[in-house]
């Protein structure tokens, strides 16, 4: 549903504007509310309310008697914030999430099918450069004939 890579900047009031194409996808799918939380690889995950509920039910099924499950759920859910973009498609990210993702001004917004990822431009460029070299080997391991 969400696809593409978009370079943007945090404005002087600390807001981030969502790319028009992603706003259109949200509008066409009646998505008004998102949840943003700590993601993996030092990015932020932004999920529609429906996708958030789906992931939440999966993560709640992880036994709390397992230390890894408790740790993951604590970090994932404690970082979560409900966000409704304004009429111009702008969102305000909490400072603790920007610090987690090392976001200062320049960001890259990435559509990854069922979620949006928000990266600091520097970390995205580093991740992208390092990952492109192994893309074909990863595909061979993950995708069967």
Image: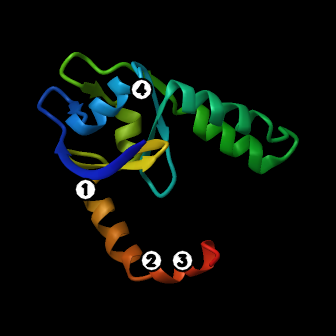
Horizontal relation, residue 58 to residue 40: left or right: right
- Contact flag, marks 4 and 3 (Cβ < 8 Å): no
For discs 4 and 3, the disc positioned in front in the rendered view: 4
Residue shown at the point (52%, 33%) measured from the top left: 79
The disc label shown at residue 85, or none: none
Mark 3, other Cα within 10 Å: few <14 / some 14–19 / many ≥20: few
For discs 3 and 1, the disc positioned in front in the rendered view: 3
For marks 4 and 1, the one nearer the N-term is 4
In the depicted structure, whether residue 97 falls above or below residue 121 = above
For discs 2 and 1, the disc positioned in front in the rendered view: 2
The disc label shown at residue 121, or none: 1
In the depicted structure, whether residue 43 falls above or below residue 82 = below
Q: Residue 62 in the image: x percent, y percent? A: 80, 41
Q: Separation of disc 4 and disc 3 at Cα?
A: 31 Å
Q: Which residue is mark 3?
A: 138
Q: Separation of disc 2 and disc 4 at Cα?
A: 31 Å
Q: Residue 77 in the image: x percent, y percent? A: 60, 32
Q: Quadrant of residue 16?
A: top left
Q: Residue 52 in the image: x percent, y percent? A: 57, 31
Q: Which residue is mark 4?
A: 29
- Contact flag, marks 2 and 4 (Cβ < 8 Å): no
Look at the image and name its color scheme. rainbow
For marks 4 and 3, the one nearer the N-term is 4
Q: Residue 42 in the image: x percent, y percent? A: 44, 54
Residue 118 visible? The answer is no
Q: Separation of disc 3 and disc 2 at Cα?
A: 5 Å
Q: Nearer the viewer, residue 44 or 133?
A: 133
For discs 2 and 4, the disc positioned in front in the rendered view: 4
For marks 2 and 4, the one nearer the N-term is 4
Mark 4, other Cα within 10 Å: few <14 / some 14–19 / many ≥20: few
């Amino acid at each position: 549903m969400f696809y593409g890579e978009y370079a943007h900047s945090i404005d002087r009031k600390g807001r981030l504007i969502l790319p028009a194409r992603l706003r259109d996808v949200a509008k066409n799918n009646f998505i008004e509310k998102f949840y943003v939380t700590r993601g993996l690889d030092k990015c932020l995950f932004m999920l529609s309310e429906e996708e958030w509920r789906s992931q939440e039910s999966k993560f709640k099924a992880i036994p709390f008697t397992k230390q890894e499950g408790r740790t993951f759920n604590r970090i994932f859910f404690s970082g979560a914030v409900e966000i409704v973009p304004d009429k111009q498609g702008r969102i305000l990210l909490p400072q603790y999430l920007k610090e987690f993702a090392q976001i200062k001004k320049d960001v890259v917004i990435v559509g990854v099918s069922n979620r949006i990822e928000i990266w600091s431009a520097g970390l995205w460029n580093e991740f992208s450069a390092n990952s492109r070299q192994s893309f074909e080997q990863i595909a061979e391991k993950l995708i069967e004939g």
